[in-house]
């Protein structure tokens, strides 16, 4: 099972490879069939997925022997972020895709095979980790105590700063920042209008010619940062989670959101720069530009002009983004499951608000 988006795409890519690996490692003792279903499970009040509660229903409905759920929602157990939750008693496991960083299909299939070996009791491929691998490890194992004669779930926690960096990078990838750019239609329109004004305004020509590359780069960074912060606060994307480890979760969630917005803003900037560069090359004659600047021109003058105009346009795009629908920007910023989690949290906060209750 896989959440829609990156998790579902990865599940589809690794299905055939998993079947080959299973047939080879099981020495053809069983006929393994790997099925992929884009089925999502409901989230609890804290935004977590409790797979074990649904295993009986899923096994009766689909007839699966083992159930592995690929999710893009960070999971916490015992106040620790975890990368996988394995329940041998239920023959099920949850794999947190963002914990794998950029999660290449080959890496995901390797992790799923490790989980399947543990669930099915197949002999694990014991390859002792090297000293470097032990040093770079970001996982630690937690075993729950037995209950009702059954062994408890086993968790692999995410340890240290390096593990958190992997998790945040995976969360950003699951958010797919490139989806946000088409949703910012008003921001793009405002940026294009402001940038075009800069291209055809002779004072901007002189300023772009005078400024150093270092100063132009600084202006670029400021414009991208301003647009990102505007999107963050205007669209209410900043989160203040409640419950356990709320400070850590606030850092993880908000860092992932900020990075998603910065990547989207940078992508919009690059598109705007290319459009303005092409427009300036087509419209502005080089002799006329040389006359205005009072010196011979080369392609670098056109690049500097588009560079400064794109920065000014990006600042104008921040104002234009105010006209984009907040809900549309929120949905485009996050993965589907992350959007659902945040929506549930907002609903919970509104239901607890006494003023909302009075309404």
Image (cartoon, rainbow, N blue to C red):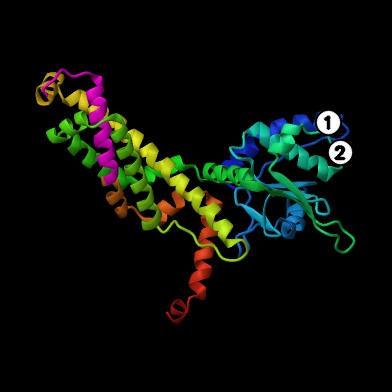
Magenta span includes 303? yes
Report x, y in % for residue 234: 36, 57
Q: Residue at coordinates 85% horizontally, 33% vertically from top-left?
A: 26
Report x, y in % for residue 76: 66, 56
Does the residue at mark 1 contact the one at mark 2 (Cβ under 8 Å)? yes
Q: Residue at coordinates 44% horizontally, 42% vertically from top-left?
A: 179
131 lies above or below 242: above
Magenta span includes 87? no
Residue lying farthest bottom? 358
354 lies above or below 339: below
The disc placed on residue 36 is none
341 lies above or below 95: below
Q: Is residue 70 visible?
A: no
Nearest the eye: 203 or 43: 203
Q: Residue at coordinates 20% horizontally, 24% vertically from top-left?
A: 282
Quadrant in which the C terminus appears: bottom left
> Which range is magenta?
294-315
Of the image marks 1 and 2, the number of the one nearer the N terminus: 1
Q: Is residue 23 visible?
A: yes
Q: Cα distance, mark 1 to mark 2?
A: 8 Å
Q: Which residue is mark 2?
A: 122
> Is residue 254 left or right of 123 when viewed as pictured?
left
Q: Which residue is mark 1?
A: 25
> Is residue 234 left or right of 160 when viewed as pictured?
left
Secondary structure at numbered mark 1 = helix
Using a 10 Å C-alpha cutoff, classify the residue at mark 2 as few (fewer than 14 neighbours), some (14 to 19) or many (20 or more). Answer: few
Secondary structure at numbered mark 2 = loop
């Amino acid at each position: 099972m896989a959440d829609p988006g990156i998790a579902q795409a990865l599940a589809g890519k690794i299905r055939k490879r998993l079947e080959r690996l299973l047939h080879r490692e099981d020495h053809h003792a069983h006929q393994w069939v790997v099925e992929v279903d884009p089925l999502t499970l409901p989230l609890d009040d804290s935004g977590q997925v409790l797979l074990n509660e649904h295993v009986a229903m899923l096994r009766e409905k689909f007839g699966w022997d083992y159930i592995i759920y690929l999710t893009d929602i960070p999971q916490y157990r015992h106040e620790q972020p975890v990368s996988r939750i394995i329940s041998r008693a239920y023959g099920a496991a949850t794999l947190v895709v963002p914990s794998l960083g950029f999660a290449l299909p080959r890496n995901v299939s390797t992790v799923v095979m490790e989980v399947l070996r543990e669930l099915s009791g197949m002999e694990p491929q014991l390859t002792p980790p090297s000293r470097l691998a032990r040093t770079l490890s970001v996982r630690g194992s937690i075993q729950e105590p037995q209950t009702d004669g059954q062994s408890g779930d086993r968790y692999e926690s995410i340890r240290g700063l390096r593990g958190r960096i992997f998790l945040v990078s995976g969360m950003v990838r699951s958010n797919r920042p490139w989806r946000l750019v088409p949703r910012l239609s008003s921001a793009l329109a405002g940026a294009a209008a402001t940038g075009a004004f800069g291209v055809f305004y002779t004072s901007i020509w002189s300023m772009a010619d005078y400024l150093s590359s270092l100063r132009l780069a600084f202006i670029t960074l400021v414009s991208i940062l301003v647009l990102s912060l505007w999107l963050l606060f205007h669209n209410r994307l900043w989160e203040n989670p409640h419950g356990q480890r709320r400070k850590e979760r606030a850092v993880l969630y908000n860092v992932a959101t900020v990075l998603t917005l910065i990547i989207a803003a940078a992508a919009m900037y690059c598109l705007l720069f290319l459009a303005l560069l092409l427009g300036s090359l087509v419209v502005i004659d080089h002799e006329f530009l040389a006359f205005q600047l009072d010196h011979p021109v080369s392609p670098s003058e056109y690049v500097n002009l588009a560079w400064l105009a794109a920065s000014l346009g990006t600042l104008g795009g921040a104002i234009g983004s105010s006209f984009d629908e907040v809900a549309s920007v929120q949905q485009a910023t996050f993965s589907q499951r992350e959007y659902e989690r945040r929506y549930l949290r907002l609903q919970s906060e509104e239901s607890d608000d006494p003023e909302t209750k009075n309404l």
